[in-house]
Image (tube, grey):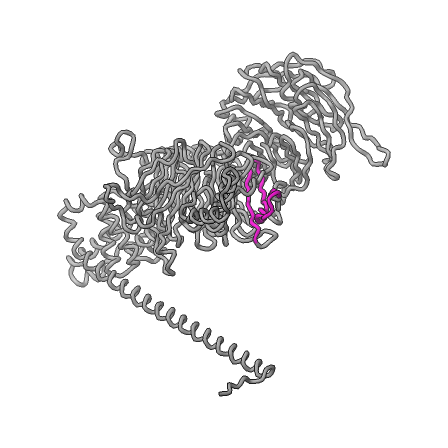
Amino acid sequence: MVHSYLRHGPTQAFGLICSNSSNSKYGDKVAYVPALEDVLVWDVKKGQLLAVWHETGHRSEVTCIERSPQENVFGVGYADGSIRLWDSGSSSVIATFNGHKKAVTALAFDNEGTRLASGSQDTDLIIWDIVAEAGLYRLRGHRNEVTGVRFLVPQATRSTSVDSPSSILLTVSKDTLMKVWDLSTQHCMQTAVAHRAEIWSMDISSDQKYILTGSNDGDLKAWKINYEAVANGLRESESGEIDKIIDFTASFPLALHHRASRVLFHPYQPYLAVQSHERSVEVFRIRTEEEVRKKELRRRKREKEKKGKEKVGSTVTETKKTLDEGDPKPDEAILPDFFAPLLVVRASGKVRSFDFGTKDTGKGKSSVQIFVALTSNALEVYDIPPPTTSKGETLEATRAYVLDLPGHRNNVRTLCLSSDDQILVSGSNGSLKVWNMKTTACIRTMDCGHATCSCFLPGDQHVAVGTKSGEILIYDLASSTLVDSIKAHGATVWSLHVRPDGQALVSGSADKEVKFWEFRQETAAHLKKSLSLGHVRTLKMSDDVLSVRYSPNGKLLAVSLLDATVKIFYQDSLKFFLSLYGHKLPVSCMDISDDSKLIVTGSADKNIKIWGLDFGDCHKSIFAHEESVTQVFFEKKSHYFWTVGKDRLLKYWDGDKFENIQKLDGHHNEIWALAVSNHGNFVVTGSHDKSIRVWEKLDEPLFLEEERERELESVFERGLVDSLNRSEPGDEINGQSSTEVTTVTKQTTETLVAGERIMEALDLANSELEALREFEEQRGRENISEAFNLQPPPRNPILAALDLKPEAYVLRVVEKVPSTALHDALLVLPFTKVISLMHYLDTWARMGWNVTLVARIMFFLLRVHHHQIVANKLMRTSLIPMRNHLRGALRQEKDIVGYNLAALQHMRQKHEAEGIAQFLEQNLEEDNAQGLAGEGKKRKRVSIR
C-alpha cells in the first residue's frame, strides 16, 4: 500500500505593518499599504487592521498602488507584471490584467476612471479599458524602467461641465526622457531629454499648469504645458519649428542634493512635498500670483532704497515713479518664486513613500496631514501647521499618529513556542514581541539587545534570550519585565536549550565555551518570586560553538562547532562519546528526534545529514536547499523533520525514507527562524522580510508520486508560458522594438488552460453533432417503419447532465473564460479549431445568444487569422451567412441601446426640470416668509408725491 502523509498549507501571516516594495496611499485616516503579496488597510488613528486584500495562490510582491477617481476602486501592480483592480468595500478583485513581462512600476487612471495606463520595468506602456476589461494597446519608446505616468486633462474639459476623455499621456523613465503621447492616434508627440540622470518622479500641479520632475542628481525641474499646441495639434511656426507641448521653464536645486525619489502636489491645497533624503520630506507652500507680485515689489523697493542712499539728492517722488514703472507682471514672475520652503518633516526612520491626506483630517480646518510609510515596518502621520506671518517663528510638523507595535523594526531572528502552543515569542535586533497564536495579536513588546536565540523556561512564565553581546536575558511574560540580565559569554550566544528534566539550561557561544546553568528561585524584598540562573560548570571547546542540543532521553549533549564537526558528549560526566564529521562548511543547526535515535544536522554547505546516535553512522546526506540551511527541527513523536534556508523555502522531510514530502514557498526573503508546534499541528517561520507565517497541517492526504508529478507539471507549464511570451526575433532592431504600437498579449497558465477547455468543448460538441448527423442520414436511407424503430445515439454524459445542446455547451464554456483572458485563450487555438468555432459563432448570431461576446470573438479571430481566412475558399460559404446574421443581431442590439439612451436622457431632463422648479418654489416661499416677518416689525413705507 502506498504510504500517505498529511499536507501542510499557509494559513496566517502577521508581524508585517508595511513592506518597502511599493508606494502607499492615505485618505480619511485610512492607509492602504503593501505587505509583500498583500495590501493591508489600516485605521491609523485606532491602530486597527481593517482589511487584507489577499488573492489565494498569488505569491508576487505588490509594486505599485493607485487610487481610481471611481469610489472604492484601487489599481494594484505586482512584481510578475499583473495588475489587479480591487474593490476596497468588499476587499475583492474586480478584474485581473496580464500584459507586462516584468514588475509594474507606475499606474495612472484617467479623469473618469474608465482607462488605466501602466508602466513597467520591461519599458512598455499599456493602456487598459477597465469597462471592457481588455488591453487596448501597448506603447513602446522608452529604453529603461518607466517611473511615472500621468493623464493630462485638457483645459477645455476642465472649463466645461461635460467630461471628455483625456487623450494626452505623460511618461517619464530612467532613460532620462520625458515623453508626450497622443492616445487618439497612438503615437509619441514629443520627447524631451528632461535630466542628465535617471528620472525617478513626476507630478502635475492640481491646476494642470505645471509638471515637476525629480531626478537622481537631486535636481527638480519645472515644465509648462502649452494647451494651445494640445488643442491645435503639431503645427510648424513661421521659423519652421514645431510647437512644443511641454516647455522647460525653470530648475531649482533642493536643500539636499540627493535623489528626488518622489514629488507630490496636494490634490486641492497649495502644498508641494518632495522626498530627497532617506529620512525626511521637504514641504513647500505654493504662493499665489498676488503674493509673488508683492514680494517682487518689496524686493525692488529695497533695491531702490539702497541705491537712493548711495545717490544724494534723489527725491521720494522719483523713487515712487520709477517703482510704478517697474511693476512686474504676474507672467514675468519666475517659477521658483512660487514655491516657498515651509518645513521639513523628519521621520523616525528611512522613508519609503509618503502621501497627503485626501480630506482635511488635521486638528485645524486649514491644517494638512502627511502620511509616511517607513522601510522599518512602521507608519507615521504628521500634522503640517498653516503658514504664519511672523518672521522669526519656525514651523515644525507634529506627529499625530504612529503605527509600529504589530511588527518588528528589523528582521525576525528567533522564534519559540510555549509548551501549550498558545503563545509565540519572536526576537529581533532591538525588540522582543509576544504573540497570541489564536488571534495573531501582539500582546507584549519588550526592549532587548540583538536577539540571536531564545527558549521558553519550564512553566511558560519566563523566556530566556541570548544576544549578540554575549548576555542571557530573562523576561517575565506576565509583567513584561526584564527579571535578570547575566553577562554569560564574551561573544555572541548562538544557542540555548533547556534540559529535558527542566532543571537546567545550556548555552553555546562564539567564545568557544559551552556553559551550564541551573534555575534558582529568588525571593526579593517585596516577597515576589523571580527566576534567575546560576552558573554550574563550563565545557571549553576547540572552536566557536554554533549550536547545542540535549537528547530527549537526557543522556547526551550534542555540540556543533565552526570546524564543521558535531561533538557528542555524555550529559552527566561530559565525557566524549562521538564525533560526526562530513559537512564541508560549519553546521549551523541540528536537532535530535524524540526517541533519541536520530540526529539531523543542517549546514552552510546547503546539505542536511541524518545520523544514527548509537554509532554515529551517517544514514543519508541530502542536498536540501539552494542556499545555506538556517534551522532544522524534528516533529514531535516522529522521524519527520522541517528545514528552512536562505533560499526562502520551508521543506518537510521523512527521516526514515529520506524523502522530501513537501516544499512550501511564501516568504520573500531568507528565513532565519523556525518553531515547530509541540502537538505537531503547525510550524511557524520568521524571515528577513519581517513577516511571521503559520503553516498548518490540513486533513488533505499527500502522496509523494502525485506531489512530484505536480512539481514537474508546474516546471513544464512555467517553461511553456515563458517560451510563448518570448519576443519574436524580428520584433527588435538594434535592441529596440521596431513598432511603436503593438497589441496587448501575454500567455499565462490560466489562458493556456482556458484555451484547452475551449478545444475540449469544441471536440465534444463536434463529435455529438457528427453522431446526430449520421443518425439522421441513416434514418433517411431506411424505409418509414424501420426508421421509426431506429434508436437515436446516446447523448454525451456531460451534455445529458447539464441538459444542453452542443452549441449551447460550447457557448457556456466560452462565457466562463474571464473577459481579460479571452483574447489570449483564443490565440492558443489552432486554425482547424478556429474554423470549427466560426460555425458555432454563426449559429449563436442566428439565435441571438450573447451577441456582444460573439461579435468580440468574431472580430478578434478575423484580425488575427486574416491571411489564412482570405486564402481559404471554403470559408466564403460560412462567412457570407454569418455577416448577414451578425449584422442583423448587432442592428437589434444598437436599437435597444439607442432606445435606452433616449429614455435615460429624458429621465435626466425631467429630473433637472423638477430640481429647478423646486429650487424656485423654495426661493419664493423664503421671500414670502421674510415679507410677512418684516410686516410685523416695521411700518410700511409709503411714497408721497
Outermost residue on the left side: it is: 873
Magenta stretch in the rendered image: 366-394
Whether 127 is among the magenta residues is no
Q: Position of residue 486 (x, y in %)?
A: 74, 25
Picture quarter containing residue 680? Answer: top right
Q: Residue at x 38, y 61 (%)?
A: 161
Residue at the top extreme of this rendering = 542
Please state the horizontal and vertical placement of residue 429, each as a whole percent of the image. 63, 30
Q: Residue at x 56, y 32 (%)?
A: 687
Residue drawn at (57%, 80%), measured in percent from left and top?
934
Residue displayed at 55% across by 26% down: 656
Where residue 291 appears, x then y in whole percent? Answer: 49, 49
Q: Nearer the viewer, residue 278 or 815?
A: 278
Can see residue 931?
A: yes
Q: Residue furthest front?
A: 313
Q: Is residue 613 left or right of residue 773?
A: right
**Camera sees residue 95:** no
* Closest to the observer, 126 or 937: 937
Q: Is residue 266 left or right of residue 551?
A: left
In this rendering, the count of numbered labels is: 0
Does the magenta segment cover residue 368?
yes
The location of residue 772, given as percent across then percent down, is 23, 55
Left or right: where 466 falls relative to 4: right
Q: Is residue 386 above or below residue 176?
A: below
Question: In this rendering, is residue 422 above or below 164?
Answer: above
User: Which is more toward the observer, 738 or 525?
Assistant: 738
